[in-house]
Amino acid sequence: MPVSDLTCPPLAHAFLCVQWLRKKGLAGADKKAGRVAAEGVIASYIHPGSRLGVLLEVNCETDFVAASEKFQSLVRPAAVRLTLSFS
């Protein structure tokens, strides 16, 4: 969200500010709802002992995001954590 969008009421009206930000966020989510996330990464993890494993697919909108180091570093630990949640 751009800084220019953060024109909330003063701190005394924090509740109104929170409501405004929620409304603004939902409006932004509606605009993005129709987008297709067709690119992504698949990660696999086999727990030691080979009795439990996970294949995890994480999608994104562009191949540039899927190829980024930051996105790649998100997927592998997520697969590990998902496996550990079932063990």
Image (cartoon, grey):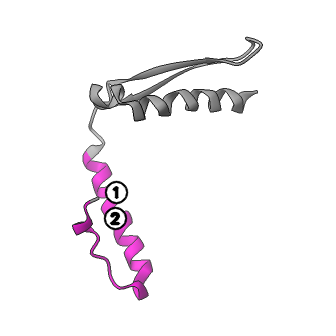
Lateral position of residue 13 relative to residue 54, left or right:
left
At horizontal 30% and vertical 63% (from top left) the residue drawn is: 24
Corner quadrant of residue 52:
top right
Tell me the element at label 1: helix
User: Distance from label 2 to label 1 (Cα)?
Assistant: 5 Å
Instruction: Quadrant for the N terminus, please.
Output: bottom left
- The amino acid type of the residue labelled 1 equals Leu
Disc 2 designates what residue?
23
Q: Is 3 on the left-hand or right-hand side of 12?
A: left
What range of the chain is rendered magenta? Answer: 2-31
Residue nearer the viewer, 64 or 25: 64
Is residue 70 placed above or below 22 in the rendered structure? above
Q: Amino acid at mark 2?
A: Lys
Q: For this rendering, which residue is in front, 1 or 25?
A: 1
Check if residue 85 falls in the magenta segment: no
Q: Main secondary structure of the magenta part?
A: helix
The location of residue 5, given as percent across then percent down, is: 25, 67
Are dots 2 and 1 in contact, CB under 8 Å?
Answer: yes
Q: Quadrant of the C terminus?
A: top right
Q: Residue furthest bottom?
A: 12
Count residues near mark 2 (Cα–Cα under 10 Å), then give few for <14, some for 14-19, many for 20+.
few
Find residue 7 and report its image quarter. bottom left
Residue 60 location, x and y as percent? 35, 31
Relative horizontal placement of residue 62, taking residue 71 as reference (left or right): left
Residue 11 higher or lower than 4, as above or below: below
Farthest residue toward the front? 69
Image location of residue 49, percent across then percent down? 77, 13
x%, y% of residue 57? Answer: 47, 23
Residue marked by disc 1:
26
